[in-house]
Image (cartoon, coloured by chain):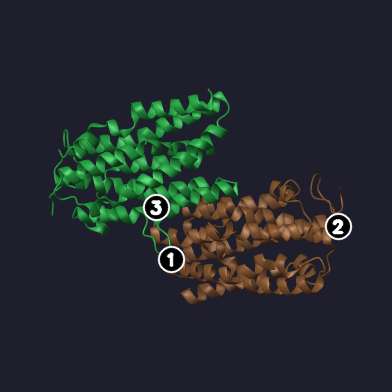
Chain colours: A brown, B green
Amino acid sequence: MTAQELEAAIRQVGAERYHDKHPFHRLLHGGKLHKGQVQAWALNRYCYQSAVPRKDAALMSRVHDRELRREWVHRILDHDGADGEEGGIERWLVLTDALGLERAYVISMQGALPATRFAVEAYVNFVRKRTLLEAVASSLTELFAPSIHRERIAGMLENYDFIGEHAMQYFRRRLDQADRDSEFALDYVKRHATTPEAQASVVDAVRFKCSVLWAQLDALHHAYVSPGLIPPGAFTPGAP
Amino acid sequence: MTAQELEAAIRQVGAERYHDKHPFHRLLHGGKLHKGQVQAWALNRYCYQSAVPRKDAALMSRVHDRELRREWVHRILDHDGADGEEGGIERWLVLTDALGLERAYVISMQGALPATRFAVEAYVNFVRKRTLLEAVASSLTELFAPSIHRERIAGMLENYDFIGEHAMQYFRRRLDQADRDSEFALDYVKRHATTPEAQASVVDAVRFKCSVLWAQLDALHHAYVSPGLIPPGAFTPGAP
């Protein structure tokens, strides 16, 4: 494949497999969930958010090129925050605050679905163990993120009276960050995936990452929508 | 042990095993080396400097506590540099520049001793695989660094006409950074090593790290001082 064909193959994976196609997201953005279901989504998604800096540190721990590390460390700073800047995880907690969830409970992840945590750790381990090229490629779902974030901001603000502008700041901020990050990573894989094997591994890494995201929504849908079978110990809307 | 006794045990390891006691350092600081030997030291030590951010990223990839990551990321920024700040690795290359070494050759590590690279990677792997407590503890040789840096700055400036103030900026900057970092890490291990087993693992981690540093000087001494047996392919002073 040429670099352009590789990019097209990556975008095709997104068109077929990115979690914007999942029924749970249509329910979420269309105002079809009750508050308890939105709470379940937000507290489960916290597991993913809070693992992202570990994933990025795992990637950096394998990088011998200082320039690549200097670029990648921005992602850790974006999520964890830096001096005088709160960071994306804090902004996610603003959302869970707004939804009326206790911070300590959210951060403890005690109410998260086991399948959420398994999917998230599968992602961290993928980045630890696969090639650096695959690790970089697995971040490329960010190519598809801005449109879902725009849809989410608009849909949730319009459809839920318990969601205000303040709660959406995580997504507003990611609109810019995801563009910058995904452009860098896309350029990296186009420059470094120069054999058919390497190109196939890149496309597979994007497929893998789509599965990580999709599996989290499957678990939410099963537990909180249909059939609504909440695993023992997991968050139960309205429970004391 | 109380926290104070643990600190004393850590400091005792430094008193017995830190590489300021190695004969190579006495030669280096006392002006007893010729320029080629100082070059060999600087280009081998580059391997260690350039691995430090990978080591710190490996540590961060295991940290679930955001506050600890926010503290630790400073080390990566200190070494790799950040926007508008050159970082410690760049400052090390200023030293190798001043010694007349080609940057591309230094960065390639082609002239470094195999034993140097093995010791450095042993350190990265230790931090990847041991407990987080041991990983943090292995940074504690920084407790002993400021005095060796002060001795090095004074000794090298006085004793070598090929070393000027500009070349010493790495060490000047580390004087402050190492103090801040080691105070944080010491406080961390004192708070977290609360069982005899954990305390023993902390002291062993400091011993291990002293060995990583000592082994690098042993290799330099063997190759470039006595008996002066340079391994095939390693840097040879004065060679074209």
- Label 3 sits on a secondary structure element that is helix
Task: Tell me the chain of label 1.
Answer: A
Residue A218 seen in this snapshot? no
Residue at the image point whose x is 19% and y is 46% from the top: B157
Look at label 1 and name its amino acid. His
The x, y position of residue B152, in whole percent, is 25, 41
Q: Which quadrant does the C terminus of chain B fall into?
A: bottom left
Pick whichever, B139 or B182, lies toward us.
Answer: B182
Q: Tell me, yes or no, whether dots 3 and 1 are on the same chain.
A: no
User: How busy is the neighbourhood of tag 1: few (under 14 within 10 Å), some, or many (20 plus)?
Assistant: some
Residue at the image point whose x is 37% and y is 33% from the top: B210
Task: Tell me the chain of label 3.
Answer: B
Q: Residue B213 carries which label?
A: none
Q: Quadrant of residue B154?
A: top left
Q: Name the residue under label 3.
A: B79
Q: Which of marks 3 and 2 is in front?
A: 3
User: How busy is the neighbourhood of tag 2: few (under 14 within 10 Å), some, or many (20 plus)?
Assistant: few
Q: In which quarter of the image is residue B32?
A: top left
Q: Tell me, yes or no, whether dots 3 and 2 are on the same chain.
A: no
Disc 3 to disc 1: CB gap under 8 Å: no
Task: Tell me the chain of label 2.
Answer: A
Disc 2 to disc 1: CB gap under 8 Å: no
Q: Which mark is residue A192?
A: 1
Residue B19 seen in this snapshot? yes
Q: Mark 2 points at which residue?
A: A227
Measure the C-alpha gap from mark 2 to mark 1: 45 Å
